[in-house]
Image (cartoon, helix red, strand yellow):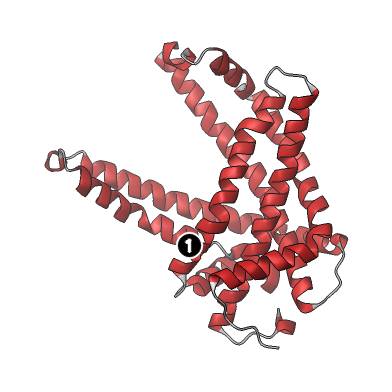
Amino acid sequence: MRILPRRLGQVLTSAMTTLATVWRPLAPTSIAAFVPASLLTLLVFHMTGFIDLVERVLADPMYLQRIPVTEYDQIVRSLIQVGFLTAAIQGAATVFVFLFANRLVRSALIGESVSAREARHHAAVRMFSGITGGLLAALTVIGALVLGLFAWAYVVNRPTFTNQILLANILLFVLISPAIWLSVSMSMFTSVVSFEEAGVSGSLRRSIDLVRGRWGQTLVFLILVGLFGTVAIQLIQLIALPLSFGGQSSLVSWLVALFGVAAQGLILASIGATYAHWYIDLRARKEPVLVNQL
């Protein structure tokens, strides 16, 4: 049976239906994947003094305003390092969960019986391509963003741009638009790696090709699906996990942290499964696709 293109609402409905089918094998592995990632994140927090800094700021909100500039700069550099390390740890766990969820979605759509163990093996085998592709995509987007911001700062600091706020904002959007375009265009690379077993460069090029012609719709999809999930995950990272190591040893703080880990895994697994359905729809618009060809 050929897969036909669908509207955004139909894609989301289909994704929810699939999630209801695969949630039993999906949930335990997705949650478990973020247990070591969360422990490593907490270890980084401790080793870099992030937890101590959080305690000081919570106890004294004016702490950062009173410290010397040199000490403040050192804190900023440390926070940047913490950000990169934790992003790498969480990114690796996210790639694994996305690949795992994509495999379960494929099995559900073609009517194939696949165990969680087989899906985990599928994800593990493709982790190198997934992580390397994700890193390359992130560096490309960040590079384009930094170049755009530097160009913007150079132009707006010239005397002719004095008090030209509206024009400066328009110019900012224009200069960072390549980074936005790249981030949306390469958003389907994990699904390509999972479904088509493509390599690093091949998966990124394939994602760009699939999104071409549906860029605006893909942006709306990413905002609807990814933004809400990302906000929830960041709240978990910034509140739930540090709370358990913020000088509190109560059972409640530990339960909050455990809930945060579980919620993070489930949220990302749901996003990954939904991305798989959008990838299939994009592919169906580019070429004839039969169910058994997925």
Image mark count: 1
> Which of these two is toward me, 40 or 57?
57
Q: Quadrant of the C terminus?
A: bottom right
Residue 193 pos. (x, y %): 66, 67
**Going by the image, does 19 lie left or right of 152?**
right
**Residue sitting at the far left:** 160
Residue 251 image offset from top left, x and y in percent: 80, 24
Which image quadrant is residue 246 in? Answer: top right
Residue appearing at x 80%, y 46% in the figure: 32
Q: Is residue 290 above or below residue 268?
A: below
- 251 sits to left or right of 200: right
- In the rendered image, the vertical position of residue 134 relative to residue 66, given as above or below: below
For the point 77% across and 40% down, the residue is 36
Q: In the drawing, does residue 145 fall left or right of residue 150?
A: right
- Residue 267 position in % (x across, y down): 67, 50
Where residue 162 sits, quadrant-wise, is: top left
Disc 1 marks which amino acid? Val
**The N terminus lies in quadrant:** bottom right
Local crowd at mark 1 within 10 Å, few (<14), some, or many (≥20)? few
Residue 180 image offset from top left, x and y in percent:
42, 57
Q: Residue at x 61, y 17 (%)?
A: 55
Quarter of the figure with residue 278: bottom right
For label 1, the residue is 220
